[in-house]
Every structure is written in C-alpha cells, then in structure tokens.
Amino acid sequence: MSALALLGIYLSLGALVQLSGRAPARLAPSLNWWILNVALPALVLELVPGLRFDPQLWFLVVSMWIVFAGAWLAAALAGRWLNWSRGRIGAVTLMAGLGNTAFLGYPLIEALRGREGLALAVVADQLGSFIALATAGSMVAAIYSGRALSATQVVRKVAFFPPFLSLVAAVLMGLSGLSFPPAANTVLGALGATLSPLALFSVGLRFRPSLDASQLGAVTVGLGWKMVLAPLLVFALGSATGITGLTLAIGVMQAAMAPMVTAAVISDQNGLDFQVSNTMLGIGILLSFLTVPALNVLL
C-alpha cells in the first residue's frame, strides 16, 4: 500500500470516529498535546541536525510569510468590496494565510519527497508558519476580535513552544557539527514516527465540511489564494531568485497546503467567523490530497 493511501486511511478513520459520536471529549486535544510536545520535537531533533544549511533555506521561511501577507491583503480588499464583517475578514486571513504545514504537510511531503524533503518541511513550518501564527496570527486575531494584544504574551508563546525550542537546539547542533548517538536517534525516530498517523487522525476528528451560499464568496477568496495563487507566487519568487531542486519544490508544496487546524481553533477562541473557518478547513483538506500530489508531479 502506498504511503499516500495510508495517509487517506488515517484521515478517514478520524472522520469515522467523529461521525460515530463515540470519541472521548478530550481525544483530539490529547492527541494534539502528544503531537506538539513529544512527536514533533523528537522529529525535529532527529532530522534537523543533519540538514545541510545553505543560503537557499531563506526561501522556505520567506515563502510562508508571503502566503500570510497576501492572505491579509486579499481578505481586507475582498471584505471591503463584499461588505464582510470584521470577524469574517479575520477568519479568512488566518485560514488563507496559515497552512497546515505540520499535521498535514509533514505526512504528505514525507510520502511524496521522503525524509530529505521532510527535513526541509520542518524548517518551513517552524521558522515560517509557526512564527507567523504566533506573531502575525495573534495580531490579526486581536485586531479583528477587539482584544488587546500583549507583546510579552506573543514572545513567550514563541520562545517556550517545545517544537521551537527543539528547532533552536537542533540548528545549534547542526552548526556545531554535533549529533546524537545512534541509540538516541533510534528513540527519536520511533517517537517522531507517531506524528503522521496521529496528526491525520486528529485532523479527521475535526473534519466537518459544510458550505452554504452566504459563505461561498469568503471560501472562494480564501482557498483561491491559499491553494492556487499563493503557490504560484512562491514558485515565481523561487524561480526569479535562483532557487532550484528540492528546496523550491518544498517551498511551493508547503505554500499550497490546506489551512491550518490551529488557525481554526484560534478563530473560534477569538469570536471570528468560525463557520467560514471550519468550511475552509474541511474543503481545503480534501482538495490538498489532489492538488499537492499534482504540484509534486509538475515540480
């Protein structure tokens, strides 16, 4: 069975458990705790120290910020033209600007591009998407919900996030030429291997796509940017600046990922348009199983 088919099975199992109504109330948050505090840090520590650091890595980080900035601009302009509420503008910005570069991106890229591609995907996610989520994403949520924004809270959220701490440690190890002993790498690999099945299962548990006429404009603008225009712009940037090979492919594929699950949670917590957020999340996940492999073939 192909790795891509297994990913679909993991996602489908989560959706089936959710539809059955028999999942424990705290199942998804508990799985997410393991993923973010154990599996992802282990994966980072296993893969990143051996990554060859070269000047092209800037592209992976800048690409994720371009996706976010473009989404904010598109949502603000469309919102003014279509007379959206502030909550809808904020929701579309978060969902179209922040990709599922970890829970969905890691398993998809590992299946399509192997472990070498996965190491680059971690860089794009942790230095690009996560910091954009913790800083600009928090700012957007505060602006469009009316909450006051604390710079200290934003800095603390970034600085003490376990995968980010792991990434800093792994980068320092890589720059210093240090590595873990084989036995430790074996343990890290086993823990990291739990990420893909649990992440897709967790996404499936939250999978509730629905669409009505009132959401059509917002979903079209948001997903049109996130899954079509943003990857095209990232590809153009890479081509214009001499980025080639696997680095270009991973940057474009991560830019094309479905909206981030965490962004939908933040949208809900801040009183933004959660119906639009949830619809974009569900439809985006479905589309990404077609569009990301298609992009991989083209690249």
Image (spheres, rainbow, N blue to C red):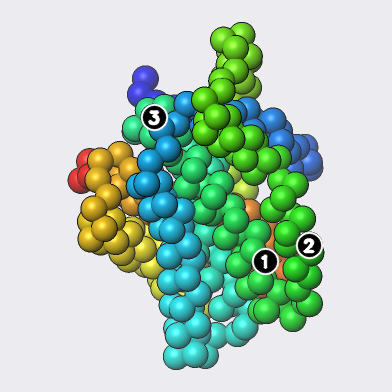
| In this rendering, the label closer to the viewer, 1 or 3 | 3
- Measured from the top left, where is residue 235 in percent x and y? 28, 57
Name the residue at 74% across, 81% down: 146
Name the residue at 47% across, 26% down: 50
**202 or 55, which lies in front?**
55
Circle 1/circle 2 CB separation < 8 Å? yes
Q: Is residue 58 above or below residue 35?
A: below
- Judging by the rendered image, the residue that carries numbered circle 3 is 116
- Judging by the rendered image, the residue that carries numbered circle 1 is 138
Quick one: quadrant of the N terminus?
Answer: top left
Question: Marks 3/2: CA distance?
Answer: 34 Å
**121 or 271, which lies in front?**
121
Name the residue at 45% across, 41% down: 121
**Disc marking residue 153:** 2
Quick one: quadrant of the C terminus?
Answer: top left
Q: Quadrant of residue 156?
A: bottom right
Q: Is residue 113 above or below residue 240?
A: above
Circle 1/circle 3 CB separation < 8 Å? no
The three-letter code of the residue at mark 3 reads Glu
Question: Marks 1/3: CA distance?
Answer: 31 Å
The three-letter code of the residue at mark 2 reads Gln
Indicate left or right for 88 with 112 as reference: right
How many badges with numbers are in the image?
A: 3
- Measured from the top left, where is residue 33 in percent x and y? 73, 38
Is residue 216 among the parts visible in the rendering?
no
Q: Quadrant of residue 84?
A: bottom right
